[in-house]
Image (tube, coloured by chain):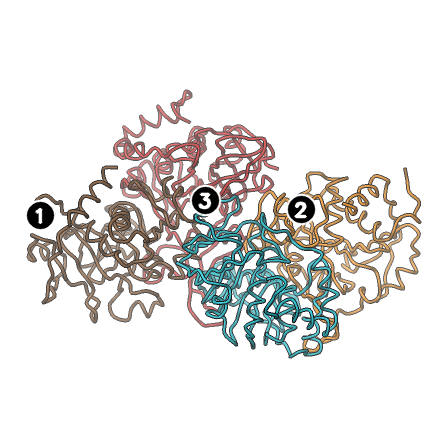
Chain colours: A cyan, B red, C orange, D brown
Amino acid sequence: MADLVSLREGVAELVSDGDSVALEGFTHLIPFAAGHEVLRQGRRELELIRMTPDVLYDQMIGMGAARRLVFSYGGNPGVGSLHRFRDAIEHGWPRPLELEEHSHAGMANRYAAGAADLPFAVMRGYLGTDLVAYTTVAPITCPFTGEQLVAVPALRPDVAIVHAQEADRQGNVQLWGIPGVQKEAVLGAHRSLITVERIVDELEPRPGGIVIPGWVIDAVAEAPGGSRPSYSLGITDRDNDFYREWDRVSRERETFLEWMSRHVLSEEVAWH
Amino acid sequence: MADLVSLREGVAELVSDGDSVALEGFTHLIPFAAGHEVLRQGRRELELIRMTPDVLYDQMIGMGAARRLVFSYGGNPGVGSLHRFRDAIEHGWPRPLELEEHSHAGMANRYAAGAADLPFAVMRGYLGTDLVAYTTVAPITCPFTGEQLVAVPALRPDVAIVHAQEADRQGNVQLWGIPGVQKEAVLGAHRSLITVERIVDELEPRPGGIVIPGWVIDAVAEAPGGSRPSYSLGITDRDNDFYREWDRVSRERETFLEWMSRHVLSEEVAWH
Amino acid sequence: MALRTAEVTSGEVQTVVAARRLRHARRVFIGVGRPSTAAILARMVHNPELVLVYESGTIGAKPFHIPLSIGDGELAETADAIVSVPEMFNYWIGPGRIDVAFLGAAQIDRYANLNSTVIGEYPHPKTRLPGAGGAPEIASSCGEVVVIAPHSKRTFVEKLDFVSTVGHGHGPGCREHLGFRGAGPTAVITDLGVLEPHPESKQLVLTCVHEGVEVEKVRDETGWELEVVSDLQVTEPPTGEELAALRELVSR
Amino acid sequence: MALRTAEVTSGEVQTVVAARRLRHARRVFIGVGRPSTAAILARMVHNPELVLVYESGTIGAKPFHIPLSIGDGELAETADAIVSVPEMFNYWIGPGRIDVAFLGAAQIDRYANLNSTVIGEYPHPKTRLPGAGGAPEIASSCGEVVVIAPHSKRTFVEKLDFVSTVGHGHGPGCREHLGFRGAGPTAVITDLGVLEPHPESKQLVLTCVHEGVEVEKVRDETGWELEVVSDLQVTEPPTGEELAALRELVSR
């Protein structure tokens, strides 16, 4: 059974400097509150893993918490560039950022292989692209047909952190709506923390509900609104204005730092 | 969009002599009505594919409809032997039955590879067993770690037939409860027929509900009670007494043939 | 009622032309922005049965509003089915279940190969772009690809800084050699006109200009020696119905 | 209240001993029949938190009745989660998330390898058995395996007709050589007693007999020269609570 902890305890217990950490979420259910807590606790030298690093990773990269980024699409969805991500790669500010870049299909299969504890997954992809020269893939031949395919190595993060709608007191978690790769990230990681909108006495099965049993989760922390400005289907709405506004906030280093200091790092946190 | 057809039309349209046919269902939602219709239409020389050939395949094998069986567990669950399956293998009655035998994990991965249109899947398994000498598997080496694993070839049946609780008028299908490998069988097959308990105006999303869009299905046929003596969760109950009784009915060739003639092949069918 | 060209923006024309392209499509794969707007518009005016698939995992979404992200709540709430990302790529995109995919890019070359990764050198880019995302496998798996891009020399380049996504590769036979399925890019719809691969050379040629656009202008904005077909078409202007629907959609 | 041995069937003893084995288990993988009954009994009297996993995909099922099949409706209705069969094997069994797996077999050898495929030659069997099902990967992946089998020379054989499932293979180091995880078979619970692999030789030795069972009888019913540990134990008879719970369960 998962431990029910405070967000502060959960992050302190599970995330250390230098860890590879997957804060997953595919547009929906992005674990902003947990990512902010990682920043408040001053974690450094992280390998951040995520298919779609967006505003949360822009914030973490901009604060210099990451040494390395493993990803497949780094943009502010529907808005444009991630300015802190770009600044780190283009100018090494506030520190250089090492990259391991894949396609979405590659990352998804890497997570699936990790969840299955297999060393690699087989897929069709990457062929003909320049990515092959800069990332970790290998040719593999079908032993039955001779067809050449591509192998991608499994992803096994030290820690997976995801957000869900609810958990019961045994730490069984239910999420619904767009599920992304969160289940795979949790099952493939060595440790896991799930933040939830609410703790309930009993999980009521939902259409589209995915239940992750408490016994494969290390810790569950209640964090109402913990995915804002992303959303938790049925509980909070996506704050599209915030994503648009982030383009302005993040464009200049000073504005960004001031915003982070005021809204994320201070003891009296405006949100989260 | 799938065509809404009668069971008779659906089977006549999609199943031909010599086809490889997966009538899938893992204990739950076994497409008995469709299998019986295949028998009534006199199909022969079939390659029958299923992880858990049970009473339905015992019937189809006993009637001589199958040339070959691809499977991983051939028993009457909780009861014992499948006598017609045994008689075919042990004595070639009513005709010899060629076998391709796998483990459950192997069959499940073969279906998953088929659904993904990949030629094979990678897994850990089979090693050390005598099955390796009699089935289709191949060693494969991880290009990253050097670990030796096992490849299994994709399953691509000519036809998949499964049963579900409901469909809407566009042929979108919803099933819930134990999902087995039905989605994989449908997606991996070249043609597909889904029988349903009922046609509804609109699918109401259910906990655990899996929706298969009508546009990946060839035909949907209404067949109320179509999984009996198996069951359709929430609509019919498993007839455990029938499974026990089958042990007696199927033990002798004559009793079996008489039962089939009376209950399955006759024009006025007692059930289905 | 036909509207005068002056009343219509080139972006509106581009969206309308993209939507028309979906008249007979069955399943379209779309990202956000203009592709998504075009697909919703197609459902409104041309093809109400069109199935919209977003890589977030929503199959058969029926958004009333233009979504900002590919994972907006409305997409999940209106979808026929929602699947995980591994399932989306492995069971739905990879096997070629999607007819048409709309893709964008920061750079496109004469073979409709796409760059969405970097401007400059990969290790030390001048401009870091978001990256390939789902595009490489979408382009190698779907029935056909339609590229939607603004027409300028910055975008239509002689040589990509980085090949993120293969269109027609090095030309004829290249997709087959790589084992790809589908026809690859069949059209590039810009704010100036439509480019299509020549059936033999696979090089993009200008097949259509939007009303009021000079061919010379299109050539000027293209970074290679653009060929023009002899029977060059002029885009049929947006109809009143198309334009009204588009504007109503944008205003929601 | 202790019950006299005469009142208890050997099958009941076997089930009770199997249930006790789950006192400290967290997740148990079970098929139908005696294993399932033992696991449900363990939840009733020893370990209410025990998570029952059936290969049909039901995780955390809490059946009130003994299921006839691994896919009975009650398992689905009471499960914490239900997953597809590919997911069950790939995400749950393969990675070793299950502590204890209960398996049965038609034949078992001194290294606790199992045959559930054929009696006789595979191409022309005397008796065709159901086949391996999930057992090979369950036995190579779970934390430990407990085999439940009736004790007779027909079952406990010198040489298997077919190796369906590897227990300890050819002996020490064999599982490691094959890359298996988990301890493999740690006990074989029969209607006569309990066999466990010798820590060094990995050969099954008799470590416990049920009350009233002669060692000679066990040797007679075993197809190889069975060794007996020096400190042979006698099974603690079923307690009144265990027996009452088991009988109540069976009568439901």
Q: Is residue B194 above or below residue C90?
A: above
Of all chains, the one bearing label 3 is: B
Residue pointed to by mark 1? D5
| Marks 3 and 1 belong to one chain | no
Q: Do labels 1 and 2 share a chain?
A: no
Front disc: 1 or 2: 1
Q: Nearer the viewer, residue D227 or C199?
A: D227
Q: Position of residue C237 (x, y in %)?
A: 88, 45
Badge 3 is on which residue?
Answer: B179
Please identify the quadrant where the N terminus of chain C is shown: top right
- Percent across and percent down for residue B209 are 50, 42
Q: Name the residue under label 2.
A: C52
Q: How crowded is mark 1: few (under 14 residues within 10 Å), some or many (20 or more)?
A: some
Q: Residue A272 carries which label?
A: none
Q: Where is residue C40 in the image (x, y as percent from the top left)?
A: 73, 45
Q: Which residue is at a point 75% across and 40% down the rendered structure image?
A: C44
User: CB atoms at circles 1 and 2 under 8 Å apart?
Assistant: no
Q: Of circles 3 and 1, which is in front?
A: 1
